[in-house]
Amino acid sequence: VAIDGVTDELGPADLAVVLGTKVGEDGRASDRLRARLDRGAELYRQGLVPRIVVSGGRGRSGFEEADVMRDYLVAAGVPADRVVADRSGVDTWASARFVADLARIPERAHREAPALQRTPHRTAAGPDPL
């Protein structure tokens, strides 16, 4: 199920999903990516999510977005064992598949997983039906 639009409904969830975006040539997260990560760290610190999935592939800069995101969150105080890095998240569809697969693991059954982004995002999960 995908819902387009901008909402910011705070409430407990099984995990948060931070979708990747640009990592600079110097290996640092872009402003947009840092905003997403800061929001994830905030939700973790507030006790609203016990785990954060960071999803992104190798960018044009040559850095793995998921690794950069994981390192950023750990430096921000999120314990490393609370961050799941998905290097296969080359697009929104791949990220959604990873989270869906993660939800099927019985001991990690996740039902609520908000995707964190800073700006409106057109649903890009799969081919356009028209």
Image (cartoon, rainbow, N blue to C red):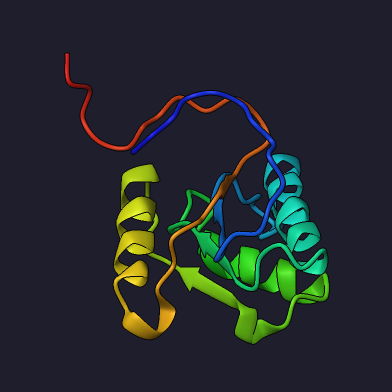
Q: To which quarter of the image does residue 21 belong?
A: top right
Q: Is residue 126 left or right of residue 30?
A: left
Q: Is residue 63 visible?
A: no
Q: Is residue 124 visible?
A: yes
Quarter containing the N terminus: top left
Q: Residue at x 44, y 30 (%)?
A: 3
Q: Residue at x 63, y 63 (%)?
A: 69
Q: Position of residue 108 (x, y in %)?
A: 42, 79
- Residue 117, placed above or below residue 75: above
Q: To which quarter of the image does residue 6 belong?
A: top right
Q: Nearer the viewer, residue 123 or 113?
A: 113
Q: Is residue 83 left or right of residue 102?
A: right
Q: Residue most toward the left? A: 130
Q: Nearer the viewer, residue 34 or 22?
A: 34
- Residue 12, placed above or below residue 119: below
Q: Residue most toward the top? A: 130
- Residue 94, placed above or below residue 119: below
Q: Position of residue 68 (x, y in %)?
A: 63, 65
Q: Residue at x 44, y 58 (%)?
A: 58
- Residue 128, placed above or below residue 63: above
* Total residue callouts: 0
Quarter containing the C terminus: top left
Q: Is residue 13 left or right of residue 101?
A: right
Q: Nearer the viewer, residue 83 or 24?
A: 83
Q: Position of residue 41 (x, y in %)?
A: 76, 62
